[in-house]
Amino acid sequence: MSRFAPIKEESKKEKWEKSPYEYGFSSPEKHMFKAKRGLNEEIVRMISTMKSEEEKMRNFRLESYKIFLEKKMPTWGADLSTIDFNNIFYYVKATKSEGKKWGDVPKEIKDTYDKLGIPQAEKEYLGGVKAQYESEVIYGSLLKKLRDKGIIFCGMDEALVKYPDLVWSHFGKIVPKGDNKFAALNSAVWSGGSFIYVPKGVKVDLPLQAYFRINTQNMGQFERTLIIVDEGAFVHYVEGCTAPIYTTDSLHSAVVEIWVAKNARCRYTTIQNWSTNVYNLVTKRAWVEEKGIMEWVDGNLGSKITMKYPSVILAGKGAHGEILSVAVAGKGQHQDAGGKCIHLAENTTSRIISKSISLNGGRSSYRGMIQMNKGAKNARSKVVCDALILDNESRSDTYPVNKIMESEVTLEHEATVSKIGEEQLFYLMSRGFEEHEAEAMVVNGFIEPIVKELPMEYSVELNRLISLQMEGSVG
Amino acid sequence: MLQIKKISVSVEGKPILADIGLELNAGEVMALMGPNGSGKSSLAYALAGHPKYAVDKGKMFFDKKEITELTPNERAMMGLFLANQAPVAIPGLGIKSFLWQIYKKFENEKRMDLVKFRNWLDDEAEKLQLKNGLLERGLNDGFSGGERKKMEVLQMLVSKPKYIILDEIDSGLDVDALKIIALRVKKMVKEDKVGVLIITHYSRILNYLKADKVVIIEKGKVKEMGGMELVKKIEDKGFEEKK
């Protein structure tokens, strides 16, 4: 209820109904091939056959499938009991082959990107757009200068054919197939995703981007990404998701593996805005060698349930890991997010900053782990988690775990939980702003330390999405 | 004219003000004085529409339009501005973009573009002797009392109100800052015919900004009304608690 009389119930309700989920559209489905619903060994084999894979990957998939069956559903986090694995499509192939030029991309798919507001001109200076539409990478364009520097940026399937040794050097090693039930599922049925290799000493000055989108009812999206940043190199990879609304539940279960070599640096930015029927269960992990730097910037806005804890394993001396995350949990949503930093070596440092917002009965949880192994002398870590709760129906929890096996270490933990104060709202309203505008200002201010780390167009989109959420929260 | 007609105000059921009646004309400066706890600031909040200050009796009018039931933003959009006694901080809310949003709400006809607006803002900030780089921060985040008060003035300049309530703008200000603020407000009164209600315990600010009317309130009631001679009396004798 509004705290500021008089309440214009009628007009506010109407406004909300007229503004449905902004990106809730879908293009007509046009598929080359769609597997049956549900999963069995035959479907796993078929996926491998469709992709003309070699025996090694086929066996990897089949072994993973066995592990998936053996592993129990995780019960320590969000409620996953309503996932119906038999009602999901595990493989859909959208177009015949990968388009190399923008002109080759089918019209429906271009329309989809137009609706997402991805400007055509952007690709020129973004350094190559990789877009995953449904389960296959259908469009990939690399600027010549990237190629000239020896950078590889392509679909995972293509990488497996062209650079099998490079792929297998790290594939399934940072996130092993038996890591957890959903990593096993991804390992069995993965399709699409990106592969990036940045050679020694090469710094990619523009972010590489990918756009992901689920566009088939009940379709699972199981992309697999591997990034290898060689010694002294740098890359920033940006991944943004928006998805249309469907009435039945959808599953998104990705695996991202990153190898950061000595003195290298990788930043991986995600804005997740799945529609609110999607289960978003993602395993992201980076291995960092001596003096390497890994930064995860992670924004979770959409989905029904998200369980995602980007991790860094600080394996080399002086390695640094950073996890910046922001989560917005609205009506019917549970954002269970956080991060893990595992310190294996001397003088390693890490920082986790987590900001969450709960409104309209939404629930956000911070779940994090700091582990410092014996030998991680002078390791330092700082965890800051701030929660903002907008009403009495919403909820926020924190579940921090510290496993410290070395004595000469420093660990700081700060946590705050706050509500938007009446005084802040009154102050902004007395400057002429509506209550929902005032709330959005306070909320956007709260997450600003993370938002400023995002590329410009993402921060603008994030602020706008939050303002839209606020309009719905009033009245 | 800003009219307060016999209003009684309570906070969480506790009566604070009784039968207050005041009239403030455009281009006029009115000083509202009284000891601590007399209800001066409560009147400011009730005028601006703070939900905690319930108007149980009486009505308020802004240029003959009743505002008693309006929300704070509706009153603000009409041209009523409250400079708060203790402005709150909104961390992360960038001042320049905040002021630009205020500006866009209030200026429709002769709107400057963003570049011009920013130059104008820098100019005004310099006149107010706001420290360099302060406008790059979050709203009032880590600001001193004096800096917060100057930010109120900057917001006031951007929203171009018709009537201004200065709720103890002089508290926590050094003499230089007080003079700068008072003279800036004086300029608005002279050039834009703004009506100003100054709430204060001290006569200091009135040395720079002469009041046309002076009202003394005590224990939630109007005790005396007059001109600057009342200020002289208070300077000499202080507020007389018993009479």
Image (tube, rainbow, N blue to C red):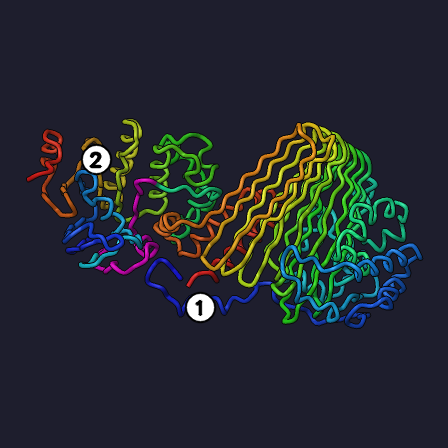
Give the image location of residue A206, x and y in percent.
70, 42
Residue B178 lies in magenta, yes or no?
no
Using the rendered view, name the quadrant where residue B5 is placed: bottom left
Q: Residue A70: which numbered mark, if any?
A: none
Res A407 → quadrant: top right
Q: Of circles 1 and 2, which is in front?
A: 1
Residue B175: image x %, image y %?
27, 27
Q: Return the residue at label 1.
A: A13
Q: Residue A147 vs residue A299: left or right? A: right
| Chain letter, disc 1 residue | A
Residue drawn at x 77%, y 35% is A289
Q: Residue furthest right?
A: A55
Where disc 2 sits, the SS reads loop
Instruction: Residue type at mark 1: give it.
Output: Lys
Residue A361 is situated, as x and y percent measured from the top left of the image, at: 50, 60
Q: Residues within 10 Å of mark 1 (few under 14, many from 20)?
A: some
Distance, label 1 to label 2, CA atoms, is 47 Å
| Quarter of the view holding residue B145 | top left
Dot 1 falls on a residue whose secondary structure is helix
Q: Residue furthest left?
A: B243
User: Given the image, what chain letter belongs to the residue carrying mark 2?
Assistant: B
Residue occupied by mark 2: B209
Q: Is residue A168 left or right of residue A259?
A: right
State the quadrant of the C terminus of chain B.
Answer: top left
User: Residue at 65% of width from left, 30% of height from top?
Assistant: A409
Q: Is any part of residue A145 visible from this angle?
A: no
Please report the bounds of the magenta region as a residue range.
Answer: B61-86
- Name the residue at 80% across, 41% down: A198
